Amino acid sequence: MKKLLTFLFLTTTFAPLLAQTRKPEVKENIPLDSIRLSDPCILADKNSATYYMTGTGGLLWKSKDLNSWTGPFVVAQTDPDSWMGPKPMIWAAELHQYNGKYYYFATFTNRDVIIDTVKGNEIERRASHVLVSNKPDGPYVPMKDPTYLPADMPTLDGTFWIDKDGKPYMVYCYEWLQNWNGTIEKVELKPDLSGTIGEGKVLFRAHDSPWSREKDDEGNIGPSRVTDGPWLFETQTGKLGMLWTSWAFEDYVQGVAYSESGTLDGPWIQEKEPITPPNFGHGMLFRTFDGKLLLSAHSHKSVNGRYVRIPHLFEVDDSGDKLVIIGPFQF
């Protein structure tokens, strides 16, 4: 457990902190594989004929062809007097276009506020939240509600979905560090996404997965506790699915679950095996301007004792009831 907590600190805490305390130098014509970015999310904006990529750290990259990128740009403008504090860490930012506006779903962490201590581990104030802009490249600013999710729950990796009832929802993770069996949950959003309605509902738990496994300090093998990076999609046959990420021992991998009811309420049936190769995860789906379906994920590896994450694109087939990865996208 100590090893896992140390890993999480190094890979998801240190990088976002640097991103918020240093103004980045904007560069042009940067190849995708030269960018260091966790949790890459790409918005293909037809209005501007531009791809916009963001992720952990909250910075933004722009491209016309997915191969050559300009950035990074600072686009999130948070309220220093809010619960986030003056310099919140930003994890797993996503961009979504909805009803003529652009929305920035992200996880914000205030390291100066401790909400709980579980098994000797202090848990910082962390929650999924939504900002808004009239343009895909921001600036993204706060809306009316100061909070979206309970202050005493560490939540992360919020994403967006319109369910069969026509209502908007945030789907997010309740972090395993507090509940010791991470969940993926949904909560209804207000029509303008400016806040939430009601309480969250559990969709499934980390222990439901047949492929995610871990070994404890005593060598006992059991289910992983981690839920990470949900992303909703529908196949061309109308099958509702969800990408999500966890661990298969030392490997960070992407799994898939499918809803039997075709709605967020499930029940959610987990695939037996991960969909990505080992050490690729936190994926999302988007279509290129010429109609190809791509999965954006980051690779995860250790280089000289330091964890490095690089965005990668895979071509995907969704013509059947289940996603099939064809292979790496060829530019």
Image: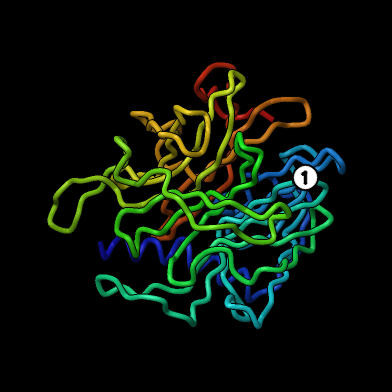
Q: Residue 279, percent across and down? A: 42, 42
Secondary element at image label 1: strand
Q: Nearer the viewer, residue 127 or 249?
A: 127
User: Percent position (x, y) of residue 168?
Assistant: 64, 46
Q: Residue at x 39, y 46 (%)?
A: 246
In the rendered image, the quadrant that contains the C terminus is: top right
Q: Quadrant of the N terminus?
A: bottom left
Q: Residue at x 41, y 53 (%)?
A: 302
Using the rendered view, name the quadrant where residue 209 is placed: top left
Left or right relative to 122: residue 13: right
Determine the residue positioned at 54% across, 16% down. Answer: 320
Residue 55 percent across, percent down from the top left: 61, 54
Q: Is 165 in front, or is 254? A: 165
- Left or right: 30 in relation to 56: right
Colouring convention used in this rendered image of the protein: rainbow
Residue closer to the observer: 311 or 205: 205
Q: Residue at x 35, y 46 (%)?
A: 205
Given the image, on which type of amino acid does mark 1 rest? Answer: Ser
Rendered image quadrant of residue 194? bottom right
Picture layout, residue 29 above or below residue 49: below
Name the residue tied to disc 1: 63
Total numbered labels: 1
